[in-house]
Amino acid sequence: MGLFTRILLTGLGWTVGGPIGGLLGYILGNILSSNGSAGEFIGSGANASHRGPYRNTGTQADVNVALMVLIAAVMKADGSVKKSELAYVKRFLLQNYGEENGKQMLKVLQQLVQQNIPINQVCQQIKVNTDYNTRYHMVDFLFGISGADGEFHQSELNMLRLIAQYLGISQSDFISIHERHVGYGGSRYSGNTSYTGNAKDPYKVLGISKEATDDEVKRAYRKMAMKYHPDRVAGMGEEMQRNAAEQMKEINEAYEHIKRLRPGIK
């Protein structure tokens, strides 16, 4: 078993079993272990299923590995893997695993996009082993990757919607994430942050309708602000923290715009 494999396995808990463990074991067995020990340790193949309850001894490494499987599912949804998406993910991996291990994880990702990913089973494994806040920010981060090339393809959006559904993300939260990233027809990287013309709907950004009362607007904003508080994303890695800070800026802009429309909100 190679050094990278030992380092990775040491940090994993619940992702060692179930469909994620099956995928990871199959790939590590191909890439990193000449005698197949990595694959035997984790799982027996790409479609391996768990036996017994999932392990509930998760670490940030588990979240990162699970997120990487979801990243692969989104990246392959439109039939091609773009350089802009790879650059975005590479930065995430290097920051979370360091230079050498990050490069090895990138190799794992490149193998993952070639696999048949049982997305429903993968999401179920994630759902029973993580809290809602973690899953919410995973979906938010996936939108950032999908829009890294400046546009969103319908096939990727369909996959993101499916992932959010399987992870148990509420409809209002999904609408909010979708609107912040996709609302005006492009990704947030285009630099368009105004609320004019074909811009984002500030109410949808907060996950509410225009018919919401002033009190409902304020409650929605406080709820969103809590989701993106630095303490809620402190252990999620630099790239996800950066994404959270960018999204909080968008939420603040939406709220300030609504306040200008509604002088009664103080």
Image: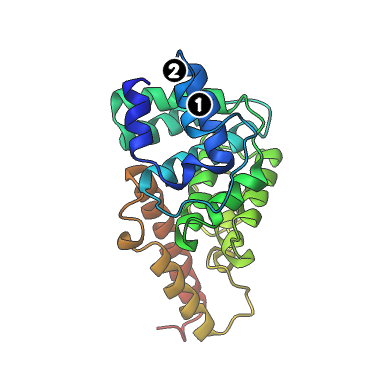
Up-down: is 87 above or below 259? above
Up-down: is 110 above or below 227? above
Q: Residue at x 65, y 43 (%)?
A: 119
Q: Quick check: 116 left or right of 1? A: right
**Residue named by callout 1:** 39
Up-down: is 103 above or below 199? above
Relative depth, front residue between 29 and 207: 29
Residue at mark 2 to residue at mark 1: CA–CA distance: 8 Å
Mark on residue 75? Answer: none
Up-down: is 144 above or below 218? above
Q: Residue at x 49, y 19 (%)?
A: 36
Q: Cβ–Cβ below 8 Å for labels 2 and 1?
A: yes
Q: Is residue 73 visible?
A: yes
What's the residue type where badge 1 is placed?
Gly
Residue 13 image point, x, y percent: 41, 45
Q: Residue at x 45, y 83 (%)?
A: 265
Q: Quick check: 70 left or right of 227? A: right
Relative depth, front residue between 179 and 82: 82
Residue 214 image point, x, y percent: 52, 84
What's the residue type where badge 2 is placed?
Ser
Q: Quick check: 101 left or right of 49? A: left
**Residue named by callout 2:** 33
Residue 150 image point, x, y percent: 55, 36
Q: Residue at x 50, y 55 (%)?
A: 135
- Which quarter of the figure has residue 151? top right
Residue 146 image point, x, y percent: 56, 39
